[in-house]
Image: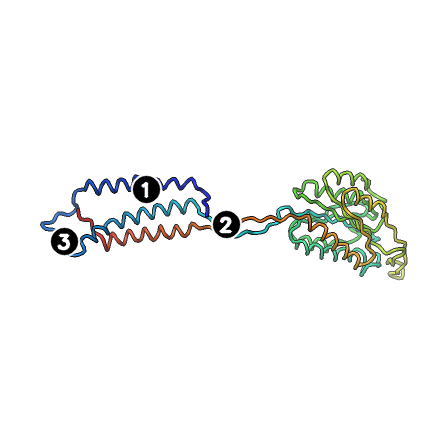
Amino acid sequence: MFFEYPGLLYLELILIPLIALYIWREIRGSSPSLRVASTAPWMGNGGKMKKMMRHLPFVARCIAISMIIVAIARPRSSTNFEKVDTEGIDIVFALDISTSMLARDFNPDRISAAKDIAIEFIAQRPNDRMGIVVFAGESFTQCPITSDRATLINMMKEVETGLIEDGTALGNGLATAVARLKDSKAKSRVIILLTDGVNNRGEISPLMAVEIAKTYGIRVYTIGVGAMGMAPYPVLTPFGIDIQQVKVEIDEPLLQQIAEQTGGKYFRATDNTKLLEIYGEINKMEKNKTAVDSFPVYQEKFMIFAWIALIAVAFEILTRLFITRRIA
């Protein structure tokens, strides 16, 4: 047990002059408060015991004062410890929402699979803060970094193609994600960049965005999504939706370079199962970087001393009223 305000315990020294004054008065004596012709009625059996008991109110008062001082010094104990994630990881999803993400080589399509599996990943990491950036021909922040899982999942569900101008601005998407993390105080900052295309738009080149990420010590995991060769893609025709085979083009060398230069890793996902495995691997790789420390869980102990003080005050009042009588 320890005290939050140990300096207040010096107030216990107040008891020294109080006890000294009480003893001095007892030795010196005082004028009787009641004059009687004879003390015979009070000289029966038990007189010695009553003389001793007349000191009980003062003793109770001293105990009450002492316990009140101890209580306000705030005694506490810390026998139990709680494990708390003190480092944490801040993660930003940078998702490609160009129209090519509607290809149906994933079930039901690339964008839906990417969202559903990302939501599973979010649910598995309750101690991390996360955010969402989306990009196509330009980029914007879908959800700032937050620890609110419900908000994050709802914002992920609202991601869809057609929100912004079409294209694939990898550099812009990566730079926007870096901007969300650059002021983060977390010791580990991660971007998961998912795309199915080749950089063809944007004011910021991917390699320039990589240099910015390196400056802030941000690690980037890149994921290329798409089947090998051809993939079914829905095309709107005058007669309705027609599924056509389109060529899958992913700039894998660029994605590998982005990952390697920032200390991350490149993955290729060709279907839902592979994408799920990739997120599982990232989950394991980053989980080991989270530090967990133990902090004491304090328990307040002042109530014990407050109750003792209250009982002592009540005892003093009762003994003065019903047990002792002061006779000089």
- Name the N-terminal-most of marks 3 and 1: 1
Name the residue carrying label 2. 78
**Please, what is the three-letter code of the amino acid marked with disc 2?**
Ser
When asked about the image quadrant of residue 105, the answer is bottom right
Locate residue 126, reporting x and y percent: 65, 53
Helix, strand or loop at mark 3? loop
Name the residue carrying label 3. 43
Question: Which residue occupies 81% across, 45% down?
Answer: 170
**Please, what is the three-letter code of the amino acid marked with disc 1?**
Leu
Q: Residues within 10 Å of mark 2 (few under 14, many from 20)?
A: few
Locate residue 242, reporting x and y percent: 88, 60
Name the residue carrying label 1. 15
Q: Nearer the viewer, residue 78 or 307?
A: 78
Question: Which residue occupies 81% across, 50% down?
Answer: 195
Q: CA distance from mark 1 to mark 2?
A: 30 Å
**Please, what is the three-letter code of the amino acid marked with disc 3?**
Met
Q: How is the image coloured?
A: rainbow
Q: Residues within 10 Å of mark 1 (few under 14, many from 20)?
A: some
Q: Nearer the viewer, residue 16 or 135?
A: 16
Q: CA distance from mark 3 to mark 1?
A: 33 Å
Locate residue 173, reporting x and y percent: 78, 45
When asked about the image quadrant of residue 169, the answer is top right
When asked about the image quadrant of residue 32, the answer is top left
